[in-house]
């Protein structure tokens, strides 16, 4: 054998030794696969638990929001009814105020007519 072949043989032996030292055995691969399966199972279990909790919290939040929506709707309807009542009261007050104003104006005109008649009578009496 020449030196090149010896070097190649040494390199191949060195590579074989490296692989033997660092390569995983079938048992190690199987053990690693089992650990990965266990980790995958635990991760899925944790995720499933999280997902179930998320669904529960989401349902509770939806229920709470529905309750708030219902309560706000009831309060808005109550406020609308109160506004309608206030508007009706204002209309009645406007009508009564207008009626009172009209009555006062009529009374003022009537009193003015009486004052004018009395003043004419006084003038006639003073002229006589």
Image: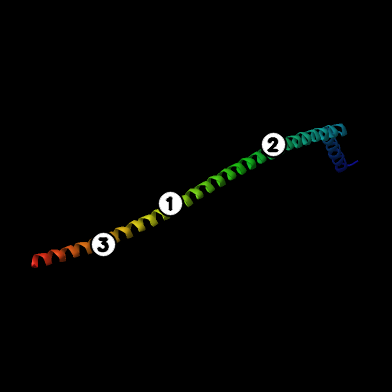
Would residue 24 be found to the left or right of residue 68 on screen?
Answer: right
Q: Position of residue 42 (x, y in %)?
A: 76, 33
The front one of 2 and 112 is 112
Q: Which residue is mark 2?
A: 53
Q: How many marks?
A: 3
Would residue 106 be found to the left or right of residue 90 on screen?
Answer: left
Residue depth check, mark 3 versus mark 2: number of the one nearer the observer: 3
Residue depth check, mark 3 versus mark 1: number of the one nearer the observer: 3
Q: Residues within 10 Å of mark 2 (few under 14, many from 20)?
A: few
Q: Residues within 10 Å of mark 3 (few under 14, many from 20)?
A: few
Task: Give above or below for 8 relative to 109.
Answer: above
Q: Position of residue 33 (x, y in %)?
A: 83, 35
Q: Position of residue 37 (x, y in %)?
A: 81, 35
Task: Give above or below for 67 relative to 114.
Answer: above
Residue at (64, 42) in percent of width and height = 62
The quadrant holding residue 44 is top right
Spatial separation of the CA atoms under disc 1 and disc 2: 53 Å
The front one of 119 and 26 is 119
Task: Give above or below for 100 relative to 62.
Answer: below
Q: Position of residue 45 (x, y in %)?
A: 76, 35
The front one of 110 and 9 is 110
Q: Secondary structure at mark 1?
A: helix
The front one of 52 and 126 is 126
Quadrant for the N terminus, please.
Answer: top right
Q: Which residue is mark 3?
A: 110
Spatial separation of the CA atoms under disc 3 and disc 2: 84 Å
Spatial separation of the CA atoms under disc 3 and disc 1: 31 Å
Would residue 116 be found to the left or right of residue 79 on screen?
Answer: left
Residue at (85, 43) in percent of width and height = 4
Q: Secondary structure at mark 3?
A: helix
Q: Which residue is mark 1?
A: 89
The quadrant holding residue 26 is top right
């Amino acid at each position: 054998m020449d030196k090149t072949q010896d070097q190649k043989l040494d390199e191949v032996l060195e590579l074989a030794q490296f692989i033997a030292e660092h390569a995983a055995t079938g048992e190690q691969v199987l053990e690693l696969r089992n650990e990965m399966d266990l980790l995958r199972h635990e991760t899925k279990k944790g995720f499933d638990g999280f997902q179930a909790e998320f669904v529960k919290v989401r349902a509770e939040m939806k229920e709470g929001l529905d309750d708030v929506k219902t309560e706000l709707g009831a309060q808005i309807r109550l406020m609308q009814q109160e506004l309608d009542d206030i508007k009706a009261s204002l209309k009645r007050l406007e009508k009564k105020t207008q009626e009172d104003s009209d009555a006062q104006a009529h009374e003022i005109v009537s009193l003015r007519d009486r004052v004018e008649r009395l003043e004419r009578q006084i003038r006639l009496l003073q002229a006589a």
